[in-house]
Every structure is written in C-alpha cells, then in structure tokens.
Image (cartoon, rainbow, N blue to C red):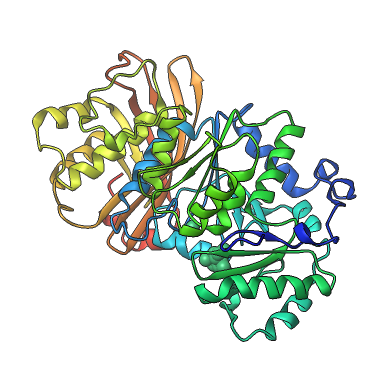
Amino acid sequence: MLRFGTVIPISSYSSITCSCINNHPHHPTSLSTSVSEASLKATMNRLAGVARLMIVSDLDHTMVDHHDLDNLALLRFNALWESNYRNNSLLVFSTGRSPTLYKELRKEKPLLVPDITIMSVGTEITYGNSMIPDDGWIEILNQKWNRNVVSEETKKISELTLQSETEQRPHKVSFYIQKDKAEDIMKVLSTRLEERGLDVKIIYSGGMDLDILPQGAGKGQALAYLLKKFKAEGNLPHSTLVCGDSGNDAELFSIPDVHGVMVSNAQEELLQWHVANAKDNPKIIHATERCAAGIIQAIGYFNLGPSKSPRDVTDLSDSKMEKFDPAYEVVKFYLFYERWRRAEVENSELYFANLKAVCCPSGILVHPSGIEQSLHDCINSLRQCYGDKQGKQFWVWVDQVLFSQLGSDSWLVNFKKWEQSGEERKGCLTTAVLSSKDVTVAKGLTWLHVHQTWLNEAGSSNGISWLF
Ligand code: GLC
Ligand code: MG
C-alpha cells in the first residue's frame, strides 16, 4: 500500500527495476584513480584508520534549529564535535538543499565544515573543503533517468508548483504540493512516469515538498554507497549515527547497522514511516530534545562516545582530563574568550591570572593583519574588553580543529576560528603551537605561538577589533 509521507519507489509495484548498479562499469571500486576517489582517501587518511563515529545529519530542523535564534544547541554540538570527535571521526551533512541554498545556510548559521557533504536529497556527494564531486555517483544516477520526461509529465499536473530554479538539479526535480493533495498526486505521478519507462523515486517531505529523483538516489542510497566504499577500503566507521526530522530522511533509518535519531521536533511523515517500518528497531530513537540537542542526546543514549559538550561545563578551569588534549584546549580557550566578552564569567583576578598562565611570556601572536604582538599583550587587551558583548548576539566557535604531535611535549594545531557579532562574521585560519613542558595535565597546555590569516574578505575590513 502507498503510504502518505513516505518514500515511494516505483519499482515496488512495477516490473521496471534498476538492477544494474552492481554490475555497472563505473562501480565505485573501479574508480580508484578519479579525483573524488583521491579526495575520499584523503578524508580517510586524515583519520589514520577507522572513524570512531560517523554522524550523518540532515540540516534544516535537525542540525539547524530555525527557531533557536541564539543557535545554542548547534554551538553546543560544535564544541562537542571539535573537542572530542573531529580528530578521529567523520561528519557528514545530508541535506535536501541544493549547493546554492546549502551555501546560503552556511552564511546564516554557525555550521561546521563537514568531511562529506551530500546535497539535493542524496543526488550530489562531495568531499572535503573544496567539495570535490563524486563522479562515480553521478554515473549511477544516470540509470533510467531522464529529467525532460519528468518535466513533461509534471507540467500536466496543475497541483504541482515548481520550486525555485536553484532547487532543480541534474538528478532532482522539486515541487511544492498541498498536504491534502500529496498522496493522490504521488500515485498518479508514479504511474505516469512508470509508463514512460522511468524508474524514479518520489519523496514527500516537510508537509509540502515533493522531490522526484532517480530510483537509485536519495539520502539512504547515498549513505549506502559511501558505506560500501568505506568497506571496500577496510575503513568502515566503528559506529554510524543518522539524524533527521522529515520524509526525505526516512531512508537513512533503513540502512542496516546504523544508529538513528529522529529529533523531538520530527515531522509527522517521518514518525508515521517509523511506526510502519522500523518501530521495533532498538537502534532508532525519537529524542526528547530538539535538533542538535537531540543529536547530542542520542550520542549519550547509544554510548557512542563523550556526550558532554564543553559548553555545558560551567567552570572550564575545573579540568578532569586524563591526558593532554590540544583540541579540548583550543575549544576551551575560545569558549572562555566568548564568555569573558559576554560577561558570563566573573571578572576575577584568578581567571585573568589563569589565562596569562596558559600563554608563554615570550609567546607571539601574528595577527591576521600581519602585526606581531606578544601573547601577554593580547591577554591584557582582552581584559579591557570584559563584557563588551554582554546581552548582545556574539558567538565564537572553532572549526576543523586538527592537530599533530611535533615532539614529546609539543603539538601543532590547525583550526578555523570564527566570531560573529550580530550579522557580521569574521574568521581566521589559525595555526598554534602548544606545549606541555613544565605543566600538569590539570593545568593544561601552554600556548607558545599563534599565527592567523583572514579567511574571508569581510574579516579584513574591520581588523582592529579582532583580538585572537
Ligand atoms: C530542501 C530543498 C528542496 C526539497 C526539500 C525536501 O528544502 O531545498 O528542494 O524539496 O529539501 O527534500
Ligand atoms: Mg530537515
């Protein structure tokens, strides 16, 4: 039976199925020389082995809470990911948005850079910072797909309103449809497209969006494709957690062996799908927390690793570390910096002394403007800024915190540091040298050297107010 709000593969009631994927000449394992393959390898090599955790998360209303104007949950997730997972795990965003709208969302919200980006409802897979497309995936999606035929047939249905031009992609045709019309129109449409010889998948999401994709596409199939590649390389992540809120995420939850979280604010269509298809699967939960807070909740519930965000730690100087941890150090430092400027920590001599103590007296900061300053002078300037962002929209977050050990007592840490004041966002690529010489684990690492370079044009326009 056709279910309202779920993925309808035409092949489930038709003889036309796409059975050629596994025998296709462009099967992923035969692509070892392509750019995307090299890019995936680079992503995996960075981990030097198997990822501890791979999170595959939807963005709108899952990672991103559009009702949370202060982005509290997202920033909590970011701090948790960068301090505990970035160095050994994989972050995958899987969104219905096209590359254009994805980039717009990145400007609006403090999103981390994922290792892999899956866009346009699983029809576009890209790797790394430069978003190298996976050409093998494109080949697979060309199977029994003809978007002209889809356009022709959909034009005949007046209930369908075409979405914006940006959302029409090579392997995705998208419409809006009234909720009460969706089920009937989906049936009509699937019959007609089947008659035209196409093997497509029709997905209804968010109580209003209707996407038509090749049968082999979709968020779930894209994840299955990635897992197959990881497996072929002997790099299957230790655990995978999929996170979603709406109809186009349903497929993610049907991939074998993955943990799944439907965030508390999940749409009716996903919850209905769950009841009908996966309610006895103990690896899937419906969180009681919204969006990114629900993701953090699931990490804890399934015991996938640490689930306490540094943002949930009130006294950051109260460290209970077992070993020196450069990533945690960086996250903690900038969290303190944010709290200091927002006057969320006490303006005390003790905190100030602690801050100075973690900076080497002869340490230097190469400011993004090119000017060299002593680290202690920077701390003195910071002191003057206590509470200057109190009650204002001011967020600081670090992204892609990656480190390597230089010697027995020193680490090289690379990360992006972002600062947002109201609408204005500035970022710097930052390289820091941290040392454990003459300090205890409880005291934390010492900052020896920091070097920063502007990441965006906007940053350089107002360089004077940039402290660290
Ligand atoms: C995103 C896309 C839209 C799609 C929807 C559901 O909002 O922009 O094109 O229909 O996700 O998949
Ligand atoms: Mg969503």
Q: Is residue 314 above or below residue 138?
A: above
Corner quadrant of residue 238: top right
Residue 262 in the image, given as x and y percentages of width and height = 47, 47
In depth, the one of 395 and 222 nearer the eye is 222
Residue at 68 percent across and 71 percent down: it is 187
In the visual, does 178 lie left or right of 333? Answer: right
In depth, the one of 448 and 340 nearer the eye is 340
Quadrant occupied by the N terminus: bottom right
Corner quadrant of residue 339: top left
Residue 228 in the image, given as x and y percentages of width and height = 73, 39
Q: Is residue 461 above or below residue 20?
A: below
In depth, the one of 320 and 208 nearer the eye is 208
In the visual, does 204 lie left or right of 428? Answer: right
Corner quadrant of residue 449: top left
Residue 326 in the image, given as x and y percentages of width and height = 41, 27
Can you see residue 276? Answer: yes
Residue at 77 percent across and 60 percent down: it is 13
- Residue extending farthest to the front is 1
Can you see residue 168? Answer: no
Looking at the image, how many numbered discs can be counted on the residues? 0
Quadrant occupied by the C terminus: top left
In the visual, does 418 lie left or right of 86? Answer: left
Q: Is residue 261 above or below residue 376?
A: below
In the visual, does 343 lie left or right of 75? Answer: left
Residue 96 in the image, given as x and y percentages of width and height = 56, 61
Ligand 1 falls in which quarter? Answer: bottom right
Residue at 31 percent across and 61 percent down: it is 462
